[in-house]
Image: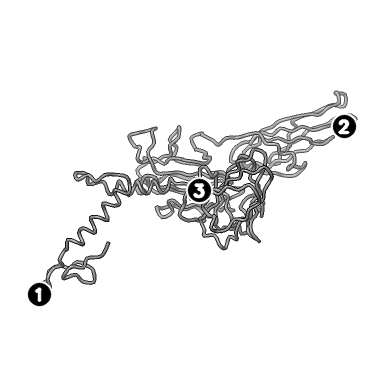
Amino acid sequence: MHKIDGAGNLNGNFVNEDAAINRPPTEVTADWMNAVQEELANVIIQAGSALNKPDNTQLIQAINQLFLTQNNSPAYRDVLVISTPTTLTPADLNRLIVFNGTVATDVNLPSIALCPIGSVFAFKNMSATSSIELVANGTDVFDGVSLANVITIQPSQTLLIAAGEIVVEGVLATWLIVEKANESPKFSGVVNISTSTTLSAQEANKLIIINDQIGLINLELPLREFLPTGARYYFKNNSQTFNAVVRCDSLGDGVDSFDNVNNSTVITLLPGETFVIAAGEAISNPAIANRKWLVTSGTANFSGGVVGAQAWQNMTATRLENVNYTNSTGRNIFLNLLANRNIIANGELIVIVDGLSIVIAWSSINSNDGPVAGSIIIPNGAVYSASSSNGAIIAWHEFR
């Protein structure tokens, strides 16, 4: 394509006739018109449509289709299969790395300084028995609870990591653990947010890292109508303590909502969680279908009562008696304890919740020798600890 170059153009721009200065109008030449026509036609053809003379909406449809196709494409461009210890280079970025070995294997990452922010490695462990150890280069670290230099990909697990620098509790985290590789996005950049923010179309198709160490923050979406179908926001709550809330535009016409059972206008993103939302159609209410936000991946908690999945976890190895812990899951958890006891004295199994001491199990000196068990609900946000007055806690499980 080229700018107009017919007689009478002014530095490639059109000008009107001006008799006062004896200036003729710019001549619109056939070769320029053909070039413009070919350029526009190629966009429509590239999107998979045939040119249709009566249809004057083909160009905008083609642009939306190409935009959607790009953002639905996986983050990896090809596949690298490994079975032995491997050192990756920047040339391997945006690949899906598939491990099919039979022995636990180290995979060394290149220096983060050589990897553009937003580029990714996607991993799929095809082994049923052996793990992969991802080893960061030099002082590079992964974001997470311990900001470790090494993370493990378990058998049959998938994982996506992205290059991007953020500060987590005063420490620079350079590799971001984003989400499962089979749900991997292609985002155009990384945005760090630590305060309540109103998002715009400018942040669309970017990975939004919520790095909040102060308290709950609110993120407000723009009106759905301002974004093309298929536009996405990728969220990761990197706070270890605080929730983040994503809201539909509250100043608009009240039509926007998330596609779920209750058509909620609010999603709660718990510490460590990720999810992706897309601008698109929703079958729950066809009358306003093109105004919906769709949650396309990750775990989202809706204000209308749809909550993320919970599961029993064995916390015995990471919990100590008489040590305070905080329920920062964003929901109530169920605590179950098992303690042995000394048969020469009465015994109590005690849980302290926000300063209130609660006996959840008791055994007398005359009861049969054996362990004692008890359970209690820990409210969201509560500080709790546990102890056994005559014996020791031998099993600690939480439904969280």
For marks 3 and 2, give the CA distance: 51 Å
Label 3 belongs to which residue? 235
Which of marks 2 and 1 precedes in the sequence? 1
Q: Residue furthest bottom?
A: 21
Q: Quadrant of residue 34?
A: bottom left
The percent position of residue 354, horizontal first and vertical second, equals: 68, 41
Three-letter code for the amino acid on which mark 1 is drawn: Ala
Secondary structure of the residue carrying tag 3 is strand
Q: Where is residue 183 shown, x and y percent of the image?
A: 50, 43
Crowding around mark 1 (Cα neighbors within 10 Å: few <14, some 14 to 19, many 20+) is few
> Residue beneath label 2, please?
342
Q: Could you tell whether 273 is left or right of 14 in the image?
A: right
Q: Which mark is residue 20?
A: 1
Which residue occupies the extreme right position in the image?
344
- Ranked by sequence position, the earlier of labels 1 and 3 is 1
The residues tagged by marks 1 and 3 sit, at their Cα atoms, a distance apart of 60 Å
Badge 2 amino acid: Asn
